[in-house]
Image (tube, grey):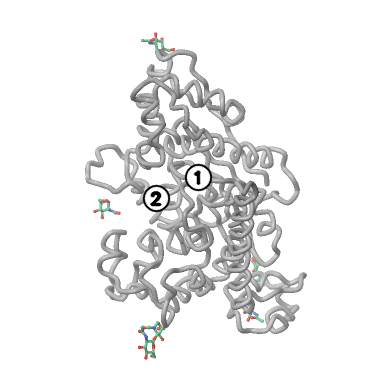
Amino acid sequence: MQCSWKAIILLALASIAIQYTAIRTFTSKSFPMCPVPNPANCSLGLDPTDSPDKLCEDNQLLTSNFSRKIHILILATTRSGSSFLGQLFNQHSDVFYLFEPLYHVQYTLIPKMPQNKSPSDRRVMLGASRDLLRSLYDCDLFFLENYIKPQPVNHTTDKLFRRGASKALCSYPVCDALGPTDIYLEEGDCAKKCNSLNLTLATEACKDHGHMAIKTVRVPEVNDLRALIEDPRLNLKVIQLVRDPRGILASRSETFRDTYRLWRIWRATGRKPYNLDVSQLTMVCEDFINSISTGFSRPPWLKGRYMLLRYEDVARNPMKKMEEIYDFVGIPSDGNVERWILNNTRGDLSSARHKYGTVRNSAATAESWRLTLSYDIVEFTQNACGDVLTQLGYKTVGSSQELRNMTFSLIEDRAFTPFL
Ligand SMILES: *[C@@H]1O[C@H](CO)[C@@H](O)[C@H](O)[C@H]1NC(C)=O
Ligand SMILES: *[C@@H]1O[C@H](CO)[C@@H](O)[C@H](O)[C@H]1NC(C)=O
Ligand SMILES: *[C@@H]1O[C@H](CO)[C@@H](O)[C@H](O)[C@H]1NC(C)=O
Ligand SMILES: *[C@@H]1O[C@H](CO)[C@@H](O)[C@H](O)[C@H]1NC(C)=O
Ligand SMILES: *[C@@H]1O[C@H](CO)[C@@H](O)[C@H](O)[C@H]1NC(C)=O
Ligand SMILES: *[C@@H]1O[C@H](CO)[C@@H](O)[C@H](O)[C@H]1NC(C)=O
């Protein structure tokens, strides 16, 4: 019986592969292949039934200068402030924003996976994730139907994960409860008042927007996106959001109380549980170090396509960072974004928010982990993630006095200028 667990894993991997192959086969018509060189037309959200020749033969387009659709990916990890960053795109009137569509890939292929569990499981998702992202950036929202359970009927579903986090999906005409002059519904109201999501309407709304942004915490590192970044049919700009791993750990312990129970026991008892799953922390740091090392080494394929952003900098100076972000992606900013920042980053926001809420006093929360983590845990994190802290400019502390002394900040001033 020694080998049986291996057999089970192989079987599981095989079944994932089969499911995935089946999905690919049924949907292979989806994304038109475009022979280079005339990629420009292929990222405009074309009808997938058009033949590739028809899409790409038109040479005059090489010389015409229409503004090209920009595809933004927010590459983040849970509790790093990605909902907040996502809002900076979601609020823009010419950006179609999707919140975490890869959730559906994960729950189809690896239904039991808790937060960031095993590295091999995460790898299993990557091929499927890249295909889905490619299709979504082409405004083919129907591709999602392969992963939504129960499978949508008549291209309609009420099971899209966090639909309400996407302004375009909570506005007229995609939300049928609204008229042309109504403003969009906030997340809770959207879920309650809009009827099932008509994916045909959502696809049209996507095509009506000049640009598209997708947020995900389900891609480990920027190297995993190389195929998409180099894909001439896309015009991908990756914004990697990082955060002090000590802050991530504190925030996750509060938010995912079951999954991070042992960390909270450590904090409460002062004793490190023998069965603590340290990979919940080390995996974050490994992913960060792999990504930022790639970013800092400036390989040609990342030129103009990668921006590194610290959550703490966004929290301290959201308006300035927002401008830098829009400069980098090359889209004119929009008054809605500015208004949203003004309305949502001041203190004194007492109204109740659920755990993924983006609305809070952002600057004050960025270093609040210093008051909640114990020094033991901080020290452990500093040892496990030393490289990341150094590279990203987060100071370590040497005592619990230093840890709790909020008069000096642990965030060094660093400018991570994008590689243009
Ligand atoms: C390519 O895009 C341009 C600009 O949007 C459009 O005018 C043209 O019809 C498109 N060509 C094809 C073959 O779809
Ligand atoms: C191309 O863009 C430039 C700068 O935006 C503009 O001056 C020019 O008129 C455009 N050309 C065409 C053919 O649209
Ligand atoms: C789907 O559309 C068909 C044809 O319009 C209709 O008969 C059927 O009832 C619809 N199914 C559902 C679940 O709405
Ligand atoms: C979804 O919207 C499309 C476009 O308006 C419409 O033709 C279709 O009937 C709608 N589907 C359902 C199930 O209502
Ligand atoms: C500002 O936020 C409040 C509370 O969330 C909301 O009621 C109001 O409509 C917002 N104003 C603007 C201009 O977004
Ligand atoms: C806190 O840090 C500041 C600046 O380093 C220092 O001047 C002050 O004495 C410290 N306070 C305590 C209570 O350690």
Residue at the image position 60 percent from the left and 73 percent from the top:
22
Does ligand 5 reach within 8 Å of label 1's beta carbon? no
Q: Are marks 2 and 1 in contact (CB under 8 Å)?
A: no
For badge 1, the amino acid type reads Thr
Q: Is residue 176 left or right of residue 31?
A: left
Query: Callout 2: few (<14), some (14-19), or many (20+) C-alpha neighbours within 10 Å?
Result: some
Q: Position of residue 86 (x, y in %)?
A: 45, 52
Among numbered discs 2 and 1, the one appearing first in the sequence: 1
- Residue furthest left in the image: 351
Helix, strand or loop under label 2: helix
Q: Is residue 26 left or right of residue 296?
A: left
Residue matched to label 1: 77
Residue matched to label 2: 338
Residue at the image position 56 percent from the left and 23 percent from the top:
383
Q: Position of residue 367 (x, y in %)?
A: 40, 29
Q: CA distance from mark 2 to mark 1?
A: 25 Å
Q: Is residue 419 left or right of residue 184?
A: right
- Residue furthest front in the image: 1
Query: Callout 1: few (<14), some (14-19), or many (20+) C-alpha neighbours within 10 Å?
Result: many
Rendered image: mark on residue 403: none
Helix, strand or loop under label 1: loop
Q: Looking at this view, is 153 or 92 the one in front? A: 153
